[in-house]
Amino acid sequence: MTALVGMICGSCGNGDVKPPFPEDSISFTTPSGKILRVACIFHGSLAFEYGGKVIHIDPVTQMGEMKIDYSAFGKADAIFITHAHHDHLCTQAIDSLSSENTVLYGNTESVTALGRGTELANGDSGELSDGIRYMAVPAYNTTEGREMFHPKGNGNGYVLDFEGFRVYVAGDTEPVAEMSDLGVIDLAFLPVNQPYTMTFSQCVDAAELIRPKTLIPYHYGDTDLSGLPERIRGIEVIIIDSLR
């Protein structure tokens, strides 16, 4: 899957301009029989389309040589920010995706830096629309000497519930005890770029703890993931090059 640019825009019912969702998105069927489409944009940037609603997590316009023109996506219904590091918080991308109808959520540090949005602490939850719920969950480092990268209580991961199809976007974290309390997870995004997030082995440990039906490693930089599917039995593993 490659970077998503240059899509043709149309219009949607709420007056915001939205293009067709990327053709190379991944599709899942929820328990209600509806289709959830997932765009793996790059690094930590993801988008979801469900029932005409579009949700972005950590949209960023540029990582290294990769660039995304978020104006091609039209306007988001909701944007979630996990934390304030530059590869997760990008004012330009947020501005491109935002309209007066867009709701913006983030951890306290991100909302403070942006000067707008709704703060979500670990454990906060709510409903975006009929059939779509969200919950902020802990994301932090646990290995001695790494705590300063992502301190406990600062950043968020997010669980998005699409009418019973539950997606876990971990944010920047190592395996943490709170993962045991996530409940059933259908699709998980776990970061694998040591020393900032998980090592390869920690990703295996986290996957075994969560037991998602499908795992997509993201935010993985130069980590070699070629042996991951063989290490995690009974879980579908999808490796996407754009999520480095």
Image (cartoon, grey):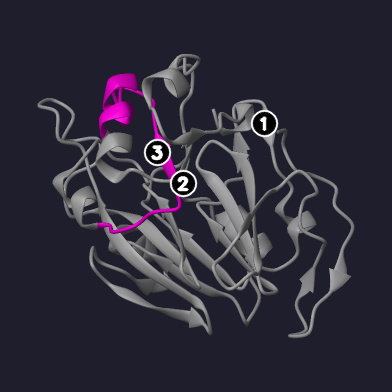
Label number found at residue 66? 1
Report the amino acid beneath label 1.
Met
Report the amino acid beneath label 2.
His
Give the secondary structure at mark 3.
strand
How many numbered marks appear?
Answer: 3
Counting residues from the start of the chain, the first of labels 2 and 3 encountered is 2
Q: Find residue 222 and report its horizontal and vertical position in percent.
A: 48, 16
Q: Could one spot residue 218 in this view of the protein? A: no
> Closer to the observer: label 3 or label 1?
3
Q: Tell me, yes or no, whether the highlighted magenta stretch contains residue 192.
A: yes
**Residue bearing the label numbered 2:** 88
Q: Nearer the viewer, residue 128 or 35?
A: 35
**Residue bearing the label numbered 3:** 190
The magenta segment: 182-205
Rendered residue at 32%/74% (across/down)? 125
Q: Find residue 14 and report its horizontal and vertical position in percent.
A: 73, 85
> Closer to the observer: label 2 or label 3?
3
